[in-house]
Image: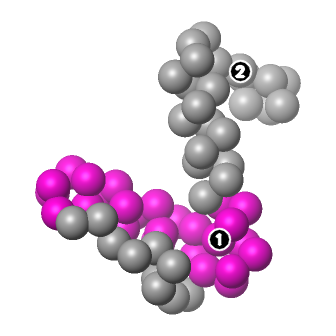
Amino acid sequence: MRKICYGTNSDRGDKFRSRLLSVIETSKKRGVNALNMIETIVTTVIEKLEYPDVFKLITA
């Protein structure tokens, strides 16, 4: 994994990578567009809105 992702220099970076990969893999299994799901989550956090129900996000 380090060879293709260039590794991380911190525990925080490791956690971020593992969580992002988890979202991507879960999206694939559920047939949901991973990029749209990540975009929705990030937009919600930036705008300080209530977190979306990611289980109800649909393929876009």
Q: Give 59 or 48, whichever is nearer the viewer.
A: 48
Instruction: Tell me the residue at 58%/68% (across/down).
Output: 34
Mark 2 touches mark 1? (CB < 8 Å) = no
Q: Bin the neighbour count of mark 2 within 10 Å (Cα to Cα): few under 14, some 14-19, many 20 and up.
A: few
| Residue located beneath label 2 in the image | 7
Q: Is residue 16 above or below residue 50?
A: above
| Residue located beneath label 1 in the image | 27
Disc 2 marks a residue whose amino acid type is Gly
| Horizontal side of residue 38 vs 41, given as left or right | right
Secondary structure beneath dot 2 equals loop
Q: Is residue 33 magenta?
A: yes
Render colour scheme: one colour
Residue 46 image point, x, y percent: 21, 51
Instruction: Using the rendered view, name the quadrant where residue 30 is placed.
Output: bottom right
Disc 1 marks a residue whose amino acid type is Ser
Q: Is residue 33 above or below residue 11?
A: below
Instruction: Tell me the residue at 57%/13% (across/down).
Output: 10
Instruction: Tell me the residue at 55%/35% (across/down).
Output: 16
Residue 56 image point, x, y percent: 47, 85
Main SS, magenta residues: helix
Q: Which mark is residue 46?
A: none
Question: Count of labels shown?
Answer: 2
Q: Bin the neighbour count of mark 1 within 10 Å (Cα to Cα): few under 14, some 14-19, many 20 and up.
A: many
Instruction: Tell me the residue at 26%/61% (across/down).
Output: 44
| Horizontal side of residue 43 vs 31, given as left or right | left
**Residue 17 seen in the figure:** yes
Range covered by the magenta-colored residues: 24-49
Q: Give 6 or 21, whichever is nearer the viewer.
A: 21
